[in-house]
Amino acid sequence: MSRIGCLLINLGSPADPTPGAVSRYLREFLIDRRVIDISAPARYVLVNGIIAPFRSPKSAHAYQKIWTSAGSPLVNYGIELQNKVQALLGDRYVVRTAMRYGEPSIPSQLKILHEADIEELRVLPLYPQYAAASVASSVEVVMETLCRDFAFPPLKVLPDFYDHPGFIASFAAVANPRIQKMQPDHVLFSYHGLPEKQMTKSVRKPETCQFNSECCASVRPDNRLCYRAQCYATTRALVKAMELKEGSYSTSFQSRLGRDPWIKPYTDEVFGELRKKGVKRLAVMCPAFIADCLETLEEIGMRGVEDWKQLGGEKLELIPSLNGEEIWCRTVADMVR
């Protein structure tokens, strides 16, 4: 029986929540030219001389807040997804989870798939919206690893799934019971941010990029790979699936780093704007993340909650990500098939 290999790729995590491990992770992550797209010498100095040494202790402290007895939440959810998808697909498939940065690495998991004598390889980057810093970077490592061999099996890279019906239905299924119970005044869809200059590099006509609601009102051939436009498309699809009323939701972007302008509006600034409008009970969804991680659990679920309280808000609730939810595992299995 021919076997099909399936590689599920997420971004990654440090090996443990210590400054040393976090420093190694940050160096591997940020030295990627698709993540910080400046000249190699400047990137080397910035990452190794400034960001890693000074940011590691603070980031390690943040990781310590979310770390579990089993280790990294992101890695653990990845393995849970792997096992459940494997069970759904059966023996004809060999499913492995890999991290673009950290362990389990892409090369180590491709080695396992190679040793399983697969006749076809299907790669699913687990990033709903396309970005060069996530999707392209992950696929690049897959190709570099495969090309070290004289020959490799037929390869299929599954596309971004920002409006995939199964993805939208999965997030709506997770969110709706919690929204109904909480009865928030407002639902905020908070996505990971990216530098504006990375958006202009992803569209056919950079001069047309306006970074506003009109520019990102639809995903078209000219902006097909625009991360910001895809995020707004995800919001629109979720709003429809969750039957949210106009004016009861908004979209923002979190996790910015450095001085360059990042795509707006910024999540922390939107918090203040919502409070000025009288919003007291806020639900936050993070549909750029298929598994809970530092950016959801700590940045929103801890720091965001504290910031909301300081602004005078009554309650902020982080809606969990898809993690190992059965409906999501079935969706992933269907995508792979």
Image (tube, rainbow, N blue to C red):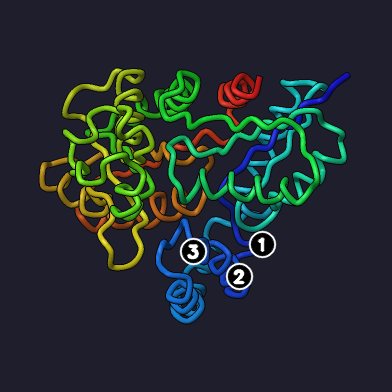
Q: Secondary structure at mark 1?
A: loop
Q: Which residue is mark 3?
A: 62
- Asked if residue 330 can be seen in this view, the reply is yes
Q: Earlier in the sequence, mark 2 or mark 1?
A: 1
Q: Secondary structure at mark 2?
A: helix
Q: Secondary structure at mark 3?
A: helix
Q: Residue 164 placed where, x, y %?
A: 46, 22
- Left/right of residue 329 with respect to residue 275 in the rendered view: right
Tag 3: residue type?
A: Ala
Question: Foreground residue, 104 or 301?
Answer: 104
Q: CA distance from mark 1 to mark 3?
A: 14 Å
Residue at image location 26% in from the left, 54% down from the top:
268
Q: CA distance from mark 3 to mark 2?
A: 16 Å
Residue at image location 34% in from the left, 20% down from the top:
242
Quadrant housing residue 224: top left
Instruction: For label 2, count other residues whose C-alpha is less than 10 Å away and answer few (under 14), some (14-19) or many (20+).
Output: some
Numbered badge on residue 160:
none
Tag 2: residue type?
A: Arg
Q: Residue 99 placed where, x, y %?
A: 63, 49
Instruction: For label 3, count other residues whose C-alpha is less than 10 Å away and answer few (under 14), some (14-19) or many (20+).
Output: some
Q: Is residue 193 above or below residue 174?
A: below
Q: Nearer the viewer, mark 2 or mark 1?
A: 2
Query: Does the CB distance between marks 2 and 1 fall below 8 Å?
Result: yes
Q: Earlier in the sequence, mark 3 or mark 2?
A: 2
- Asked if residue 305 can be seen in this view, the reply is no
Q: Which residue is mark 2?
A: 24
Tag 1: residue type?
A: Ala
Q: Nearer the viewer, mark 3 or mark 2?
A: 2
